[in-house]
Amino acid sequence: MTNQVIKWDASIAREIIAAHAHLDGAALPILHAVQDAFGFVSDDALPLIADALNISRADIYGVVTFYHDFRRAPPGRCVVKVCRAEACQSMGGREAAAALLADRKLDWGETSADGALTIEAVYCLGFCAVAPAAMIDGEPLGRANAARLIAAVSEGAS
Amino acid sequence: MSALKIFVPGDSAALAMGSNKVARAVMVEAERRGIEIEIVRNGSRGMFWLEPLVEVQTPHGRIGYAPVSVADVAGLFDAAFLEGGEHALRIGKPEDHPFMLRQTRLTFARVGIVDPLSIEDYVAHSGLQGLQRALEIGPAATLEEITKSGLRGRGGAGFPTGIKWKTVADAKADQKYVVCNADEGDSGTFADRMIMEGDPMALIEGMAICAFAVGATKGFIYSRSEYPHANVKFERALRIVRANGGLGPGAFGPDTMFDIELRIGAGAYVCGEETALLESLEGKRGVVRAKPPLPAHKGLFGKPTVINNVLSLATVPAIMNMGADRYAHFGMGRSRGTMPIQLAGNIKFGGLFETAFGVSLGELVNEIGGGSATGRPMRAVQVGGPLGAYFPPALFDTPFDYEAFAARDGLIGHGGVVVFDDSVDMLEQARFAMEFCAIESCGKCTPCRIGSTRAAETIDKIARGERPDANITLVEDLCRTMKMGSLCALGGFTPYPVLSALKHFPEDFARAPRVAAE
């Protein structure tokens, strides 16, 4: 599950949208497919989706901005999701996350200047019995204390 | 001779502890030694402190070795682990482990044992018998059976499943839906994920039984983007069952139809609330709907809809198979059957523990969970996710039961138990509850949308020692308003962790005023 994304291309976007537009309540499947392809949901995609679904641009703007997952700008080549929820807090997740952010000089949701890394907050990855939890390009990492987390991110973002 | 079977869990928690690397190392080492093996990526047994737990099939049953790291693999081969040989990591038969022996596994009977993507395995372990019985006795008797079992919604609300199904069955409509709520957003919970990864066909069968009983032809499962591995596995299971005729035209016999579509949320906690989930499935913002109308009358796309949690639906085949009476025989009071409890956070033996309702919280975290992982004294246990109360050790005698927790201003929710040791700052936990509500509020109700932000700010003032008494009163007042004035459980229940922290850990809120500079 690496971020094999392609550069924004309106004609490819149209194809992706058309492939999902027949679904009932197609907005989320379309937005996911667009983000999977390009790494983010470009502003240029919104009118295309609105047209395909016969809804207003305001409607699709409302949807895309409601959900935390959808990025409005390209992410780094490596995306790290770090859990900030209670089970991870109980095992020092706050400290591990703070150490990673300090090590990379980034804040939540930011992408490094060289485009190598994005660190995102997430609330529960579902392996709370091996907390703290993180996910590096979709691969789960348990017992992600500061040292293990920083080492794994260095490997993933190298 | 068939290849030797080795089980290396593909469960996300096992992956998080390196099981993919271990599986590869086992394969490479076997090839190097010229031994033919077959690796099965089973679900997890739920003993996560032992992951990766590698099992080998021997004539005397399956023998486990745990926790296995890549560095252990060659040594295991040297110790003849393929025949169950002695080794420092050998734990014997996993099912004989004390953590397993104390459980009653009904919903999780197959998880960790079967190959999740093998229909043959599923059928060999009593799969499809529940659906067959439902088809034999018909929809009305199936509804009767589920009602009699006393099954209540395992998502958290605890609403009787049979009554919900009956309401949809009685509704007249050209289209009805079954929706499975797999938006398992509560911190400290992973039971839904374990089912999707470890026994997805049980969930498919449960949804099929429900559809047959209420007359629905279409099912949706709404999962989380945070569960990419579960989603891949579940989608593959859907394809396999469909290819075998278990879904699609003729699913329940000639001229019948039932199929399931997997949908994935996008990081909004509130979409675990059933009406927000339905909005999201319809392609809209996940904004909560006012009830009534109930989803059973006007649900997805305005049609009668059963919406149930993964655990409720995955338990249905077991109930149909063993019979309602036997299922209802487990439990206490109005909480019948078993609950898959998830022990998480700062706990020594964390994992999935399915047991009859009635076990006490203290038994769970001390005897079964083995105390804190750090070895420090436990100070607080949050039960039921981010909307659940924090209980101090003084309340450890509370039995795991919907009503018993409610009587102590708590809730069991989806069965998540998160342990904190004595390093926890309960003011910080109370603040986080409000902050989380502010981040995740759908924005429909003012008490939730604005109350949570104001409460977080007010708790910051308490932390700075600014008029603590007056500000605590203000937080309590905000909590009351949120409880009474919010449409759904997000705004309505966020006060639980906050008020419980204030009530049971007042010392953490008595901050000395910070001396102003100069």
Image (cartoon, coloured by chain):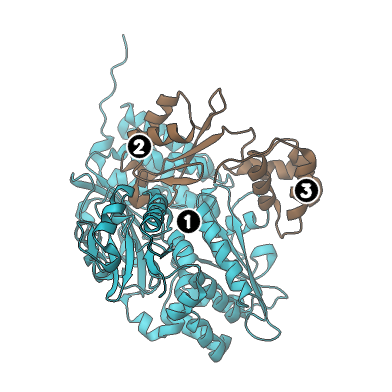
Chain colours: A brown, B cyan
SS of the residue at dot 2? Answer: helix
> Which residue in the structure is indicated by mark 3?
A15
Label 2 Cα crowd, 10 Å radius (few <14 / some 14-19 / many 20+): some
- Give the farthest residue toward the bottom: B136
Q: Quadrant of residue B464?
A: top left
Q: Are marks 3 and 1 on the same chain?
A: no
CB of mark 1 within 8 Å of CB of mark 2? Answer: no
Residue B266, percent from left and from top: 58, 48
Is residue B387 among what the camera can see? Answer: no
Q: Chain of mark 1?
A: B
Residue A145, percent from left and from top: 33, 38
CB of mark 2 within 8 Å of CB of mark 3? Answer: no
Q: Which mark is residue A148?
A: 2
Residue B518 vs B362, above or below: the answer is above
Count the marks. Answer: 3
Is B318 situated left or right of B91 in this image?
right
Is B259 situated left or right of B332 in this image?
right
Residue under the image location 25 percent in, 64 percent down: B99
Residue under the image location 64 percent in, 32 percent down: A73
